[in-house]
Image: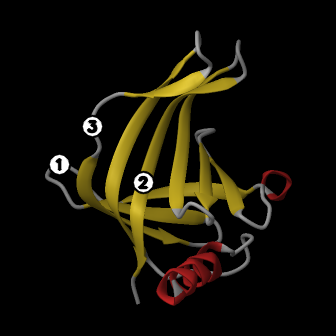
Amino acid sequence: MKKIILSLSLLMCVFYTHAQVESLPVLSKYFESYTLDYTSDEYQSNEDGQWIDIYFTPYTDYILIEIDAEGFEKEKLWWEYLPESSDDISDSYRTEDGELIVFDYEDQVLLWYYDYNEKFDRYESLDIVSKIEILE
């Protein structure tokens, strides 16, 4: 239990940047993809989850993403911190493409919303990465 609390505390320290400081790289080991089902108003899984290494290095103005799989190159995404959508258990960022990234410290996951539908004011796609560890 002490190890879980320490891990959560470290994760919170790393991501609780409030767009002010640079952070340590983070490795996610598990990836899941979802699509919004308008009938149930819930995200439905597209497939079984995948065990894949995804590296995130957050900075004040952007995040570097590197996926350990063939065909993927390191990507730099510009973002801005959203204080009105953040609280003690999560921080939210909007990318330059209008995607929403939420660091959920309580559940230790990263939620990535995209494919925004203006008509319904909803994101139609969601990726969740989990099994997170902090790299030093």
Residue 28, quarter of picture: bottom left
Q: Going 53% across and 64% down the picture, which residue do you hit? A: 108
The quadrant of the picture occupied by the C terminus is: bottom left
Image position of 100 with respect to 3: above or below? above
Residue shown at 32% from the left, 56% from the top: 30
Q: Which of the two labelled residues, at mark 2 and mark 1, occupies the earlier sequence position?
A: 1
- Using the image as rendered, state which of residue 106 and residue 54 is in the foreground: 106
SS for dot 1: loop
Q: Mark 3 points at which residue?
A: 48
Residue 133: % across, % down: 40, 76
Q: Earlier in the sequence, mark 3 or mark 1?
A: 3
Which amino acid type is marked by label 2? Val
Q: Which residue is outermost to the left?
A: 70
Nearest to the eye among marks 3 and 1: give it. Answer: 3
The image quadrant of residue 41 is top right
- Amino acid under disc 3: Asp
The label number, if any, that marks residue 71 in the structure image: 1
Task: Residue 60 in the image: state x and y as whole percent.
Answer: 65, 71
| Relative vertical location of residue 84 with respect to residue 61 in this rendering, above or below | above
Disc 1 residue type (three-letter) = Gly
Q: How crowded is mark 2: few (under 14 residues within 10 Å), some or many (20 or more)?
A: many
Image: 77 above or below 35: below
- Residue 129 has which mark? 2
Instruction: State yes or no: discs 2 and 3 in contact (Cβ < 8 Å).
Output: no
Give the percent coordinates (x, y) of residue 4.
Answer: 50, 80
Of the residues tagged 2 and 3, which is closer to the observer?
Answer: 3
